[in-house]
Amino acid sequence: MAVRKIVLYPDPLLARVSEPVEVITDEIRELCSDMLETMYAAPGVGLAAPQVGVLKQIVVYDPSGKEDERHPVVLINPEVTLTGETVVSEQEGCLSVPLNYRADVKRSSAIHLRYMDLDGVVHERDIDDFEAIIVQHETDHLKGVLFIDKIGHLRRSLYDTKVKKWLKRKKEDA
Ligand code: NI
């Protein structure tokens, strides 16, 4: 297992669409355990494969948020149907969105989720609350969508200005 480097916005890779996993190989299993290790090390509650530079439809997450009581979940080729009402996910963040930026995002309160596990078994579940919001956020990554794509033009352009300044500083310090 290894902690992998997390790809940061504005890397264009984060805007690309991921491919479905055709066969669950040892390489895929290793990727999933690395993704979990990377997520826990960050620390974060979810991570999608493109965030470690792999354009495959894989998501890992842990809705427990507790270090002593881990519930890691791996989703291969997840398909989400929004089934709830619109709610505001408060102060959402993302490991790929620098400067610890957070903003409120509209999400569905519940989803129907279909996915494959690492044994190739297909599962269907209805989930709600915090877990449903994590899964919506992470599966958006597989479509090349970040939460900052959902925050409105003014907020987004203010954020982009901050990122540009931060990148410039980083370049000057290097
Ligand atoms: Ni994210």
Image (spheres, rainbow, N blue to C red):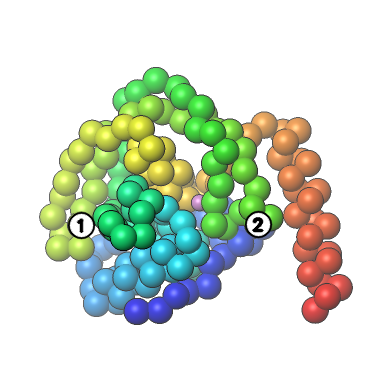
Q: CA distance from mark 2 to mark 1?
A: 30 Å
Seen at 36% across and 32% down, the residue is 129
Q: Residues within 10 Å of mark 2 (few under 14, many from 20)?
A: some
> Callout 1, which amino acid?
Asp
Q: On the rendered image, what quadrant is the N terminus found in?
A: bottom left
Viewer-side label of 2, 1: 2
Q: Residues within 10 Å of mark 1 (few under 14, many from 20)?
A: some
Q: On the rendered image, what quadrant is the C terminus found in?
A: bottom right
Q: Are marks 2 and 1 in contact (CB under 8 Å)?
A: no
**Res 130 quadrant in image:** top left
| Above or below: residue 48 compared with residue 31 | above
| Residue sticking out furthest to the right | 172
Labels 2 and 1: the sequence-earlier one: 2
Q: Which residue is mark 2?
A: 98
| Above or below: residue 58 compared with residue 172 | above
Q: Mark 2 falls on what kind of element? A: loop
- Where residue 8 sits in the image (x, y, percent)? 61, 62
Count of picture labels: 2
> Callout 2, which amino acid?
Pro
- Where residue 124 sits in the image (x, y, percent)? 18, 41
Seen at 50% across and 64% down, the residue is 42
Quick check: 100 left or right of 37?
right
Q: Nearer the viewer, residue 39 or 135?
A: 39
Quick check: 115 left or right of 96?
left
Q: Which residue is mark 1?
A: 117
Seen at 79% across and 51% down, the residue is 162
